[in-house]
Image (cartoon, grey):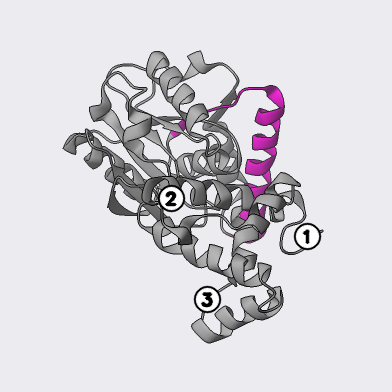
Amino acid sequence: MKEITSVAVVGAGLMGSGIAESAALAGVDVVLRDVDQAGIDRAQQRVERSLARAVEGGKMRDDEAAAIRARIKLTTDLGEIGDVDLAIEAVPEDAHLKLEVMAAIDAAVSSETVIASNTSSIPVTQLAQAVTNAERVVGLHFFSPVPVMNLVEIVVALDTSEATVAVAKAFAAQLGKTPIESKDRSGFIVNMLLVPYLLAAVRMFEDGFATREDIDTGMKLGCGHPMGPLTLSDFIGLDVLHAIGISLYDEFKRDEYAPPPLLKRMVASGRLGRKSGRGFYEYG
């Protein structure tokens, strides 16, 4: 099995740009594609800010940051991804959109390219139906912020081959990440456990049982968590949390997975958490 030397990341949002930066940091050539120039510009700014922080913090030199930037090719042209070893879908958590993107990737890359989805909750087998050969499809679920978080969930779909799983695990290790393997059901390992906890905290706040500050302080000081559940929900993005809850409920039909009405209203009003400046808390 050869080492991955080139990767395409389709979707240049927060996750996609983070995956691209992590791959480039590991010496991999990256094609980062988004639908328009505005998306590309935002991705470039994210990467520049992240590398600047690393330089300022003494984690890398200026020339190392420049080399990482040089390994990332930003484009709006899907045709640019044709020659890569691995293509990763990293668009928002919408099944219809992901299916469209997976089909477009399948049409653009060679028959030897491994195709991965960064979905956080949608069953990979569902997405693999858009690809000609489902044996080369795997879930590669990174965690945000990708350059900092060291975990990658390797999600093995119904038809994923052992060779594809081996490539996915080796790539995660190549990036300095720790891979864990999950069977293919909604939520995988981490979100299957995490999301019901977060949704329970939202319900507790919605019911007026405790203040947002006391809920978060209780879990930080009582359970040793680095941040409370409502702060973490804001950090993840309330739209993402809502989408994962919907996916889990659709799969298992259990009440603890259903997004509470308050969460639905907050997403509808644009209160998405840290990224929008307002969620359960306000951000400058």
- State the CA–CA distance, disc 3 to disc 2: 24 Å
Q: Is residue 39 left or right of residue 128?
A: right
**Dot 1 corresponds to which residue?**
283
Residue 198 lies in the magenta-colored region: no
Give the labeled residue for mark 3. Answer: 225
The amino acid type of the residue labelled 1 equals: Tyr
> Was residue 40 drawn as part of the magenta stretch in this picture?
yes
Which one is earlier in the sequence, the residue at label 1 or at label 2?
A: 2
Upstream in sequence: badge 3 or badge 2: 3
Graded by Cα atoms within 10 Å as few (under 14), some (14 to 19) or many (20 or more), the crowding at tag 3 reads few
Residue in the foreground of this view, choosing between 133 and 29: 133
Q: Please give the residue where the numbered disc 2 appears in the rendered image.
A: 248
Q: Is label 1 or label 2 in front?
A: 2
Crowd band around label 1 with a 10 angstrom C-alpha radius: few (<14), some (14–19), many (20+): few
Answer with the quarter of the image where residue 254 lies: bottom left
Task: Say whether marks 3 and 2 touch (CB < 8 Å).
Answer: no
Q: Please identify the dominant SS of the magenta region.
A: helix
Could you tell whether 85 is left or right of 260 in the image? left
Quadrant showing the N terminus: top left
Tell me the mark number nearer the camera, choosing from 3 and 2: 2
Percent across and percent down for residue 19 are: 49, 42
- Secondary element under disc 1, as helix, strand or loop, is loop
Residue 82 horizontal/vertical position (percent): 41, 16
**Toward which corner of the image does residue 233 lie, by quadrant?**
bottom right
